[in-house]
Image (tube, rainbow, N blue to C red):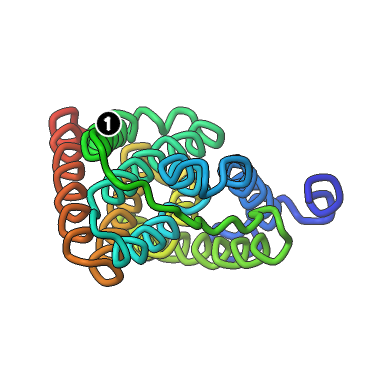
Amino acid sequence: MTAVIPPILPDETIDPWGGLNPWKVWFFTVLTASLSFLGYISVRIVGARRGFVLSAIGGSLVSSTAVTMVLARTAKLSDDSRPLVGAAALGAAVSVPRVMGLVLLIDPAAIMAIGPPAATAAVMLAGCGLTLLHGPHDRPLLDVPASNPLELGPLLVFATIFAVAATGSAALVSHFGNSGLLATAALTGAADVDVAVLAALQMGRDALPLDVIGKAILMAMAKNALCRAGIATVLGPSSFGAPLVALTIVAGSAAFAVYAALGPA
């Protein structure tokens, strides 16, 4: 993945808008999958029977959306949804520093644009999650999906989606300017926040101001959080979906308040 494929890929854009660089697509794909692999390892080590909270946190390093789906289905079989909501909130909190870590690895300067509001949302979610988990309650088993993110199949799927998103972002930016990137971030963030973040970062500060890139990343994270809340509402009982929606709104509102108070980076 890292020694054979990259040398044979061209390290230059091959589309008219300057968005599709095959070498960058594969490099970012492997980098993102490597971060997810940390969560995969933790899920494999911890396992469902050693703690559903730890499984949810580790699984969120791979896919917080998948963890939310599992928790929502588990809540239908549980008499007490409170700990499951708490685990979902903690998983959502973990997904924030995961994105921040991705930003730090690719463009450290961009962390200044997203750090304060993103950290605010993570703290709010973690605090609410720990509060809901406090006290005696049933501890259900949680079978978190643990597919190896470094398998070739998932890598190729991710790379294809990212390539399409990167090309689409560049095309929209060339025609509509900053609003093109924000529109792409909102659309792709609903399906995969990593794709949206990478598409924004690969545009580079030569093409767009840092505050626009930061706004696109935050928009993708917010859209992904809202989609998780929607999944919780559709797949889980109201005792699970409603509190998670409320927590998402509270955390998002706090993050927006910090962003508005600090202004553009």
Which residue is the site of mark 1?
123
Q: Does 167 sit above or below residue 197? A: below
Q: Position of residue 141 (x, y in %)?
A: 44, 53
Front-most of residues 133 and 172? 133
Mark 1 is surrounded, within 10 Å at the Cα level, by few (under 14), some (14 to 19) or many (20 or more) other residues, namely: some
> For the residue labelled by badge 1, is the local secondary structure a helix, a strand or a loop?
helix
Q: What residue type is labelled 1?
A: Val
**Rendering quarter of residue 188:** bottom left
Quadrant location of the C terminus? Answer: top left
**In the drawing, does residue 113 fall left or right of residue 247?**
right
The residue located at (14%, 36%) in the rendering is 260
Q: Classify residue 174 by image quadrant.
A: bottom left
Relative placement, left or right, of 192 versus 177 is right
Residue 93 location, x and y as percent?
A: 34, 39
Image label count:
1
Residue 57, picture quadrant: top left
